[in-house]
């Protein structure tokens, strides 16, 4: 039975003749470890077909999911951060911005655009976590504010997709000022009676949670998203108690009344279109009996 034994030693296959499986063909679910092809994962909108785990995706994928035929007009696409504080950590802040822009092909941690979702006009601001952790700096606040102004001017509903680690430390107070700035803009949007929907995705934390992410007319989330202000470790050390199971998950937040509903990514576009269509419909005025009308008139 020598046919399955290596009789000769030192057999070496040249590198150029080795047959290897190309990288990037398969995706392994971080939750249930199910392995599927990258193509199937994309067709499933980057969710697991076995356990429904939602992988983190960024503005490129969300625009592709939401906008009809992936057609949209990007707003203020060339805004880029300056260095008001001359901040330096392991490298100067401008160098970090340039390096991140080259790595991600993004100008900053949010993109804004106008298009149609199932035929309904929609302005979308979507954060990108791979740009310095989706941190909120001056450009993020400015682009969101300008997108809100665009919604106000054209009377188009506004959707904010949050995904952030919080304020950008390299801009210190300038970053924190964006919380007030965006909140004030949303107050103006509310006065114009233009709908604002806030979609919280994994993770939404820090100053983003403490400002525009929780100010929606409807606050919604994807399943399993981490939503909170401070991290669980900080909270546990502050209150000196163990935290409940599933603390700061979207399901926990929904149960305690901070979300309106949780929506699967596959259903997101249709649910948004249905909701916005419903909000756009004129409300019927209930009939008033003549006797009641006379009484009210008196």
Image (cartoon, rainbow, N blue to C red):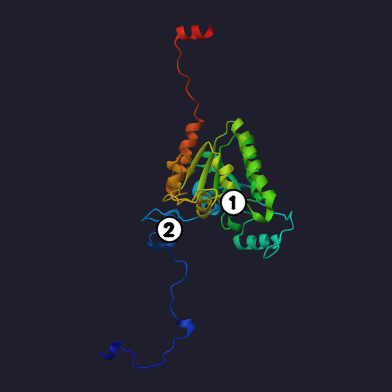
Judged by depth in the image, the label closer to the viewer, 1 or 2, is 1
From the viewer's perspective, tell me whether residue 188 is left or right of residue 258: right
Q: CA distance from mark 1 to mark 2?
A: 29 Å
- For residue 104, above or below residue 124: below
Please rate how many residues cluster around mark 1, counting C-alpha atoms within 10 Å: few if below 14, some from 14 to 19, many from 20.
many
Pick whichever, 168 or 13, lies toward us.
168
SS under mark 2: helix
Please rate how many residues cluster around mark 2, counting C-alpha atoms within 10 Å: few if below 14, some from 14 to 19, many from 20.
some
Q: Between disc 1 and disc 2, whose residue precedes?
A: 2
Measured from the top left, where is residue 104 in percent x and y? 60, 60
The picture quadrant where one finds residue 37 is: bottom left
Residue 142 appears in the picture as rendered: no
The picture quadrant where one finds residue 53 is: bottom left
Measured from the top left, where is residue 95 in percent x and y? 69, 63
- For residue 139, above or below residue 41: above
The picture quadrant where one finds residue 101 is: bottom right
Pick whichever, 216 or 235, lies toward us.
235
User: Which residue, given by chain and number where applicable, does mark 1 sit on?
Assistant: 166
Q: Residue at x 39, y 93 (%)?
A: 9
Pick whichever, 147 or 256, lies toward us.
256
Pick whichever, 114 or 232, lies toward us.
232
User: Which residue, given by chain and number where applicable, does mark 2 sit on?
Assistant: 41
From the viewer's perspective, tell me whether residue 37 is left or right of residue 120: left
Quadrant, the N terminus: bottom left
Judged from this view, the residue extending furthest toward the bottom is: 8
Q: Residue at x 62, y 39 (%)?
A: 183
């Amino acid at each position: 039975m020598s046919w399955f034994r290596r009789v000769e030693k030192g057999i070496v296959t040249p590198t150029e003749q080795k047959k290897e499986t190309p990288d990037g063909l398969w995706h392994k679910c971080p939750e249930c470890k199910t392995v599927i092809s990258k193509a199937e994962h994309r067709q499933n909108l980057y969710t697991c077909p076995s356990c429904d785990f939602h992988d983190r995706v960024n503005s490129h994928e969300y625009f592709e999911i939401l906008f009809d035929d992936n057609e949209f007009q990007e707003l203020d696409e060339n805004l880029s951060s300056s260095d008001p504080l001359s901040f330096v950590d392991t490298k100067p802040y401008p160098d970090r911005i340039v390096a991140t822009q080259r790595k991600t092909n993004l100008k900053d941690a949010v993109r804004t655009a106008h298009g149609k979702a199932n035929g309904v006009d929609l302005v979308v601001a979507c954060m990108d976590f791979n740009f310095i952790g989706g941190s909120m700096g001056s450009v993020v606040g400015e682009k969101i504010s300008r997108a809100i102004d665009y919604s106000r001017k054209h009377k188009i509903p506004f959707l904010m997709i949050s995904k952030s680690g919080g304020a950008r430390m390299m801009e210190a107070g300038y970053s924190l000022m964006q919380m007030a700035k965006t909140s004030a803009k949303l107050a103006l949007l509310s006065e114009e009676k233009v709908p604002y929907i806030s979609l919280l995705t994994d993770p939404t934390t820090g100053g983003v949670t403490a400002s525009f992410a929780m100010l929606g007319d409807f606050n919604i989330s994807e399943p399993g998203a981490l939503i909170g202000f401070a991290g669980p470790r900080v909270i546990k050390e502050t209150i000196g108690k163990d935290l409940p199971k599933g603390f700061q998950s979207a399901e926990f937040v929904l149960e305690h009344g901070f979300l309106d509903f949780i929506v699967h990514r596959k259903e997101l576009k249709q649910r948004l279109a249905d909701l916005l269509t419903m909000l756009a419909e004129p409300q019927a005025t209930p009939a008033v009996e003549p006797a009641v009308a006379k009484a009210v008139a008196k």
